[in-house]
């Protein structure tokens, strides 16, 4: 057996090891309903801000607590608690990716980057948003 | 039909230029291909001449396109979709330029312009390689030109035409007020309704936006040169000859791409409120991965130059590196990363074209490699285990493995899309990468250190012993850091903490060994020390990253009494923001923090600076921070926040505003009045959001707030306020008697918009209080303050690494 072969074998074995360990730590996209089934487990949901309820954020009182309601495509709703400042332009977001845990009926996010907002104003290439802006002008 | 106020000529000229560039690059590709594959010298020359001419015409036409786009933006011709979508009248001149590359079409254009510049250099320098290399480059120009040509072929639209009129887009369908009510036709004076463009998002209005994209795109564009040389080598069956010529180009590419990436990191760190320089965001990864693969390719090229080994690996790495550039273009522009990245573009309907772009390079390159694989020369005799080339090769493999891991993790949305799976990285994305990459750092660090002391072919024991002194020094230094450096990052357990300490040693090892190598082996001749210098820089970068990340601290942990949350979830609450009320010195862990004012306003940029003073409790060290708030101009409530830093040589104190009261509401009059209550101890007063309990009174208080002596006549009330969410606050209103008159000292609970005054003593041991609830906002700022220790080591390392690369480029150019 050549040295190169040994090296490649080690290399492949390491890659497989890495892959397995990485896959083991992955989480899955869930709906609000299925996230409720997996209470306490870290999951990702894609949802839409529920505009019928206000975003609760009072920085003077507590700058580390922001709560709001989201609904997913199946029509389920949940309250979200985010223990950081309100993300910029969140009201305008078309969709929101949330990473956290469902605790009871509340989806709790304890990582700062647990909210990812596809924010229309960041890259204005989104035609839907451009349309919206045009009609508002 | 004519529309009022439209300027159609620039668009026609621009589109003409785009079409010329498309056609010229097509002819250039054919001409150079003919030249490269022709048998007779005359044919070769004639075709090459045509290739040169058309390639130059292509470049000039691209400049024309760029100039027209800039003109349209500059003149604010909002009838053009590009100007309307990406610029506005209020933008600074320098940002008008960045508008061009903030768009998909614009960034492709920038890419092509750099291709042109590189192509001109190649025409002058690459001699016998010109024709085959330039065929590849012209072909790339042709492919990219399809992205901006906006032509229709048999009904299929190819590319985005940057000169599209806004009325030709679908935008107006949703705007009935622009149409005649009777006919549904567009109003002839529709332009008068379009007052201003969408503008550049304020987050991008930063000088980094002016310089980072051009540098990054130069890095992107330059990766085609080594690829083209490798491809030419296979094509012309001159398998190894190209390596020497392409080596400076690979160095250049790695240097510039690295610079571009680190500029992005510096931008994120310095002027965006991301709170860091690297977040393993898919878009960041997408540019890091090709860089790592090119780094691997660079090392195998050096091996081949010195020993003749690793040529096949070189082909693989260089091809893969360039394909990864195209793949990352696909990832960031297809919208597929939409749910995983904050930076990516949204889908612009060019996905087919982007996939085709990858395919037209991937298939020929790997097809040819597969076909010719057996004829690529290689040395039968294996590398010695004590040779430099063996360990350099291992190092390249490790870099490649690291890249493979990062791109696999970043690409998760792709299998999700293809196979309908729904996998994603958990809520701690950074750690998912860090826990793997830290071991890569360990291996790379050691290899970088020891590798320098190994000789090609075979290393004698005597030579190997030279690595002992730097090893000892590195051990001593890194143990000193481990002991004195206060690295206690135990968030992920002791295993990870141990890995950090190990990685610090390995990074230090790389720095010390390479620095001593420059001094001992090359005798300080810096001109030949490019590689070692780059390694020192790389090691320093790793030290900087390890220390600044593991010792990063949130200084603004909300330790003050006023905002402690008694909700059940309070344990989860990281409480990284602290609220500072104007002029109220607030306890912030190791510091006192005071929000002094926000009087400094730059009205031209709609920027308000918040003046915050931090005072270290221990040694009274005092400094000011001016994080600012920029209004986007759309509404008074639409603001973005930019950070400010205080630099020390060994750390940065970094702060940004998370939220602030709106100064524009400040002048609202406070019309609420005090209501009188007469209560006893342990009685309660109700207010709209909760109740107040009088816990007791303290005569002549002497504490941090009041300083009365026993001879005074003063009383302080101790009150607890509990709001409807069970949040608790303390209030201590007081009064004292002066000249037989009661002087109340009002205490305010800003969080509850509550002011309480202690007005005196009534009959039957009752006490009189006044309570005022005011709707007016209190001037406050919610701030996040972070400490980044040793961040300067990272920037210093970056500079040194880039300098090392630059030195190597010059040396290798001379060696051709």
Image (cartoon, coloured by chain):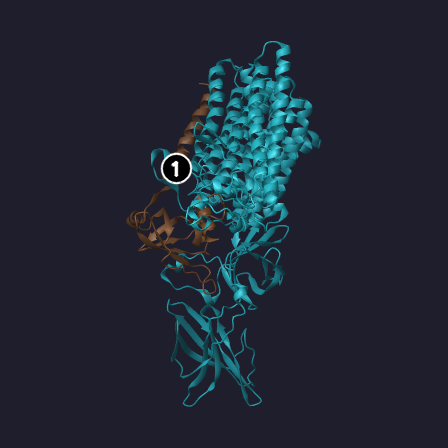
Chain colours: A brown, B cyan
Residue sitting farthest toward the top = B40
B39 in relation to B287, above or below: above
* Identity of the residue drawn at 54% across and 74% down: B705
Residue at the (63%, 36%) spot, across then down: B802
Q: In which quarter of the image is residue B646?
A: bottom right
Horizontal and vertical percent position of residue B487:
52, 49
Parent chain of label 1? A
Answer few, some or many: residues within 10 Å of disc 1's Cα (few below 14, many 20 plus, some between 14 and 19). Answer: few
Query: In this orientation, which residue lies closer to the viewer: B557 or B250?
Result: B250
Residue B466 place in picture, x, y as percent:
63, 30
Does A2 sit left or right of B592 as displayed? Answer: left
**B413 left or right of B71 in image:** left
Q: Residue B257: in sight, yes or no? A: no
Asked whether residue B337 is in view, the answer is yes
Q: Quadrant of the N terminus of chain A?
A: top left
Q: Based on the displayed image, in which of its 4 quarters is residue B51 positioned?
A: top right
Q: Residue, x 55% and y 88% (percent of image)? A: B741
Q: Is residue B51 above or below residue B289?
A: above
Q: In this view, does B552 lie above or below B216?
A: below
> In the visual, does B193 lie left or right of B241?
left
Name the residue tied to disc 1: A21
- Left or right of residue B349: residue B553: right
Query: Is B58 above or below relative to B608?
Result: above
Give percent across and percent down for residue A131. 45, 47
Of residues A14 and B512, which is closer to you in this image? A14
Q: Which of A63 and A18 is in front in this view?
A: A63
| Camera-side residue of B590 and B294 | B294
């Amino acid at each position: 057996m050549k040295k190169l072969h040994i090296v490649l074998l080690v290399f492949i074995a390491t890659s497989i090891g890495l892959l397995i360990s990485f896959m083991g730590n992955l989480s899955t996209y869930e709906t609000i309903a299925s996230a409720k089934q997996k209470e306490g487990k870290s999951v990702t949901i894609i949802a839409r801000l529920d505009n019928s309820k206000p975003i609760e954020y009072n920085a003077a009182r507590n700058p580390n607590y922001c709560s709001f309601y989201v609904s997913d495509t199946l029509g389920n709703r949940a309250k979200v608690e985010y223990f950081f400042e309100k993300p910029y332009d969140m009201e305008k977001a078309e969709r929101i990716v949330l990473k956290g845990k469902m605790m009871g009926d509340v989806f709790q996010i304890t990582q700062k980057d647990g909210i990812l907002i596809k924010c229309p104003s960041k890259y204005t290439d989104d035609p839907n948003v451009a349309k919206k802006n045009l009609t508002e002008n | 039909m004519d529309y009022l106020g439209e300027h159609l000529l620039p668009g026609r000229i621009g589109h003409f230029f785009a079409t010329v560039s498309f056609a010229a690059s097509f002819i250039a590709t054919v001409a150079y291909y003919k030249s490269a594959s022709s048998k007779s010298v005359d044919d070769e020359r004639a075709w090459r001449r045509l290739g040169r001419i058309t390639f130059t015409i292509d470049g000039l036409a691209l400049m024309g396109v760029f100039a027209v786009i800039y003109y349209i933006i500059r003149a604010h011709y909002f009838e053009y979709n590009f100007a309307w979508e990406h610029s506005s009248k209020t933008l600074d001149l320098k940002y008008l330029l960045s508008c061009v590359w903030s768009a998909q079409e614009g960034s492709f254009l920038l890419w092509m312009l750099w291709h042109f510049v590189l192509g001109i250099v190649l025409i002058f320098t690459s001699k016998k390689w010109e024709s085959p290399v330039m065929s590849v480059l012209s072909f790339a120009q042709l492919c990219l030109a399809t992205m901006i040509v906006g032509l229709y072929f048999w009904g299929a639209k190819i590319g985005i035409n940057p000169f599209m009129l806004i009325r030709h887009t679908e935008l107006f369908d949703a705007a009935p007020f622009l149409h005649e009510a009777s006919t549904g036709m567009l109003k002839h004076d529709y332009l008068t309704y379009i007052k201003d463009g969408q503008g550049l998002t304020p987050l991008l209005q930063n000088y980094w936006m002016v310089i980072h994209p051009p540098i990054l795109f130069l890095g992107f564009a330059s990766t085609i040169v080594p690829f083209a040389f490798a491809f030419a080598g296979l094509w012309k069956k001159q398998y190894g000859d190209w390596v020497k010529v392409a080596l400076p180009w690979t160095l250049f590419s790695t240097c510039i791409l690295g610079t571009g990436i680190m500029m992005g990191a510096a931008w994120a760190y310095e002027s965006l409120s991301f709170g860091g320089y690297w977040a393993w965001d898919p878009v960041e990864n997408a540019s890091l991965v090709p860089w790592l693969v090119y780094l691997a390719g660079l090392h195998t090229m050096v091996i081949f130059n010195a020993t003749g080994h690793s040529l096949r690996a070189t082909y693989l790495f260089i091809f893969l590196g360039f394909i990864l550039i195209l793949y990352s273009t696909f990832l960031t522009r297809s919208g597929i990363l939409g749910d995983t990245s904050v930076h990516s573009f949204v889908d612009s309907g060019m996905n087919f074209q982007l996939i085709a772009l990858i395919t037209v390079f991937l298939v020929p390159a790997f097809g040819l490699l597969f076909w010719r694989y057996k004829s690529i020369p290689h040395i039968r005799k294996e590398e010695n285990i004590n040779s430099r080339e063996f360990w350099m090769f291992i190092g390249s493999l490790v870099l490649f493995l690291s890249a493979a891991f990062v791109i696999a993790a970043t690409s998760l949305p792709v299998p999700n899309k293809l196979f309908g799976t729904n996998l994603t990285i958990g809520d701690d994305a950074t750690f998912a990468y860090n826990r793997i990459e830290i071991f890569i750092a360990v291996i790379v660090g050691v290899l970088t250190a020891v590798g320098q002391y190994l000789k090609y072919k075979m290393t004698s024991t005597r030579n190997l012993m030279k690595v002992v002194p730097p090893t000892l020094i590195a051990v001593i230094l890194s143990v000193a850091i481990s002991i004195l450096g206060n690295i206690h990052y135990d968030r992920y357990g002791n295993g990870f903490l141990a890995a950090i300490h190990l990685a610090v040693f390995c990074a230090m090892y790389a720095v010390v060994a390479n620095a001593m190598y420059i001094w001992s082996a090359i005798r300080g001749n810096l001109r030949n020390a490019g590689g070692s210098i780059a390694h020192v820089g790389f090691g320093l970068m790793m030290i900087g990253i390890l220390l600044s990340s593991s010792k990063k601290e949130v200084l603004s942990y909300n330790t003050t009494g006023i905002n402690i949350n008694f909700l059940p979830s309070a344990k989860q609450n990281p409480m990284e923001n602290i609220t500072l009320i104007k002029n109220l010195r607030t306890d912030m862990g190791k510091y006192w923090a005071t929000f002094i004012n926000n009087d400094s306003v730059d009205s031209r940029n709609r920027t308000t600076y918040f003046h915050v003073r931090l005072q270290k409790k221990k040694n009274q060290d005092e400094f000011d921070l001016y994080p600012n708030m920029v209004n986007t101009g759309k509404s008074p409530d639409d603001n973005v926040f930019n950070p400010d830093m205080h630099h020390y040589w060994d750390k940065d104190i970094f702060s940004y505003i998370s939220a602030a009261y709106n100064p524009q509401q400040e002048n609202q009059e406070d019309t609420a009045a005090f209501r009188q209550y007469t209560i006893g101890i342990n009685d309660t007063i109700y207010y709209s959001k909760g109740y107040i309990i009088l816990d007791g009174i303290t005569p002549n208080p002497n504490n941090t707030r009041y300083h009365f002596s026993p001879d005074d006549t003063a009383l302080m009330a101790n009150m607890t306020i509990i709001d409807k969410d069970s949040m608790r606050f303390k209030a201590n209103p007081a009064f004292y008697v002066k000249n037989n008159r009661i002087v109340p000292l009002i205490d305010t609970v800003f969080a509850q918009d509550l002011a309480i005054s202690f007005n005196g003593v009534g009959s039957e041991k009752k006490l009189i209080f006044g309570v005022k609830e005011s709707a007016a906002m209190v001037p406050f700022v919610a701030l996040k303050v972070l400490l980044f220790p040793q961040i300067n080591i990272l920037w210093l390392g970056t500079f040194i690494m880039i300098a090392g690369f630059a030195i190597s480029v010059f040396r290798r150019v001379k060696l051709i």
